[in-house]
Amino acid sequence: MISRRKTLAALAGAAVVAQSKKLPLMDEAGFQKLLASSKGKVLLVNFWATWCVPCREEMPALAKLEAKLRAKGLTLVTISADEPEDDATAQAFLKKSGITVPSYLKQAKNDEKFISGIEAKWSGALPALFLYDKTGKKAQSFVGETDLKVLEAAITKLL
């Protein structure tokens, strides 16, 4: 009986830990490290938020595209622009959308510096996709609703 109680308590504790796990935070320095660590692969970075309707609409298609091109060298990373208190909502949405790739929560020290460091012309509007070649150089940007066929063609050219 005691061992069963301990087992149940351990399972309950594990469930609490699993529920309290948060998305890792992504700041300016972290983004640069991400780019550096992705050299040798084509990297697609998706900035999104749960409150952004076009973001939510394109997420399942991005998951399918990533699965289709993963073996050829595509890496997809998602960065949520949701507020830290909405972390659980963002995680639930990622799970529902079939996103199993590395995902982060944007937590910039200076939002304007972070955004302009990614692209000077980017206002921070969502959804936003940034495509990097195998050397880590930005190849193309897609801000707003994106035609997935156009996106796939751009990725395929880099693979």
Image (cartoon, rainbow, N blue to C red):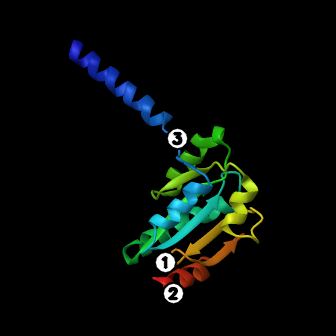
Coordinates of residue 135 in the picture (x, y in percent): 49, 78
Q: Earlier in the sequence, mark 2 or mark 3?
A: 3
Coordinates of residue 94 in the picture (x, y in percent): 53, 52
Foreground residue, 15 or 109? 109
Coordinates of residue 19 in the picture (x, y in percent): 48, 35
- Foreground disc of the pair 2, 1: 1
Foreground residue, 25 or 4? 25
Q: Earlier in the sequence, mark 2 or mark 1?
A: 1
Q: Give above or below for 19 relative to 71.
A: above
The kind of residue tagged 3 is Lys
The kind of residue tagged 2 is Lys
Q: Secondary structure at mark 2?
A: helix
Count numbered badges in the picture. Answer: 3
Label of residue 22 in the image: 3
Please give the name of the residue rendered at 58% of the width and 81% of the height, measured from the top-left corner: 149
Looking at the image, residue 105 sits to the left or right of residue 19; the answer is right
The kind of residue tagged 1 is Thr
Mark 2: few/some/many CA within 10 Å (<14, 14-19, 20+): few
Please give the name of the residue rendered at 76% of the width and 72% of the height, measured from the top-left corner: 121
Looking at the image, residue 70 sits to the left or right of residue 8; the answer is right
Q: Secondary structure at mark 3?
A: loop
Q: Which residue is mark 1?
A: 135
Outermost residue on the bottom side: it is: 157
Residue 50 visible in the shown view: yes
Outermost residue on the top side: it is: 2
Q: Which residue is mark 2?
A: 157
Q: Give above or below for 8 relative to 105.
A: above
Q: Secondary structure at mark 1?
A: loop
Mark 1: few/some/many CA within 10 Å (<14, 14-19, 20+): some
> What whole-number distance in Å separates the C-alpha atoms at marks 2 and 1?
14 Å
